[in-house]
């Protein structure tokens, strides 16, 4: 069985490309287009990993991250923040709110796949 992951981003082009990339890597991919939809899908699907944009409508990625870490039913979800907000203060804030890792856009797909594998403990798999 493939590992379920959720991708939350309000940019359609990013969702399409990340959906394709993660499915190609063998993951069971679910999509959310805003922060509230991300929280709803997290509770429904219970993915192992959330790829989370910061700047989204309804709830920001920072708000989603904070809510996830305070909800016992989903608090163990791994969170990789993917965002254009790359200032050091943003990175520190994301990690302080409970993100497991933080990558700034643009990023290489190879680096993203490697980071996902590291977080999921599958880094040695082809």
Image (tube, helix red, strand yellow):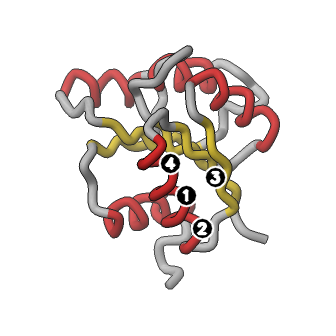
Please state the horizontal and vertical placement of residue 75, each as a whole percent of the image.
66, 31
Question: Residue shown at 22%/33% (left/top)?
Answer: 86
Q: Are marks 4 and 1 in contact (CB under 8 Å)?
A: yes
Residue shown at the point (74%, 28%) measured from the top left: 40
Helix, strand or loop at label 4? It is: helix
Query: Residue at left 47%, top 59%?
Result: 116
Label ID, residue 5: 3
Is mark 3 in CB contact (under 8 Å) with mark 4? no
CA gap, disc 1 and disc 2 = 6 Å
Residues at circles 2 and 3 in contact by the CB criterion of under 8 Å: no
Nearer to us: label 2 or label 3: 2
Distance between mark 3 and mark 4 Cα atoms: 13 Å
Q: Which residue bears the numbered disc 1?
A: 19
- Circle 4 is placed at which residue position? 15
Separation of disc 2 and disc 3 at Cα? 10 Å
Mark 1 or mark 3: whose residue is earlier in sequence:
3
Q: Residue at x 65, y 56 (%)?
A: 29
Q: Is residue 55 left or right of residue 43?
A: left
Callout 1–callout 2 Cβ contact below 8 Å? yes
Q: Quadrant of residue 87?
A: top left
Q: Position of residue 77 (x, y in %)?
A: 64, 40
Q: CA distance from mark 1 to mark 3?
A: 10 Å
The residue that mark 2 highlights is 23
Q: Secondary structure at mark 1?
A: helix
Give the mark nearer the N terminus: 2 vs 3.
3
Q: Position of residue 111 (x, y in %)?
A: 32, 63
Instruction: Determine the secondary structure under disc 3.
Output: strand
Residue 21: x and y in percent read 49, 66
Say few, some or many: other residues with alpha carbon within 10 Å of mark 4 (under 14 / 14 to 19 / 20 or more).
some
Label 4 – label 1 distance at C-alpha: 6 Å
| Residues under numbered marks 2 and 4 in contact, where contact means CB atoms less than 8 Å apart | no
The first of marks 2 and 4 along the sequence is 4
């Amino acid at each position: 069985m493939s590992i379920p992951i959720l991708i939350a981003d309000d940019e359609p082009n990013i969702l399409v490309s990340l959906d394709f990339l993660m499915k190609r890597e063998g993951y069971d991919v679910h999509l959310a287009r805003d922060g509230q939809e991300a929280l709803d899908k997290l509770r429904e699907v219970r993915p192992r990993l959330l790829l989370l944009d910061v700047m989204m409508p309804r709830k920001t990625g920072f708000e989603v991250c904070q809510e996830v870490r305070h909800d016992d039913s989903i608090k163990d979800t791994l969170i990789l923040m993917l965002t254009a907000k790359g200032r050091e203060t943003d990175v520190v804030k994301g990690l302080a709110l409970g993100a497991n890792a933080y990558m700034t856009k643009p990023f290489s797909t190879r680096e993203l796949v490697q980071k996902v594998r590291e977080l999921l403990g599958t880094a040695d798999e082809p």
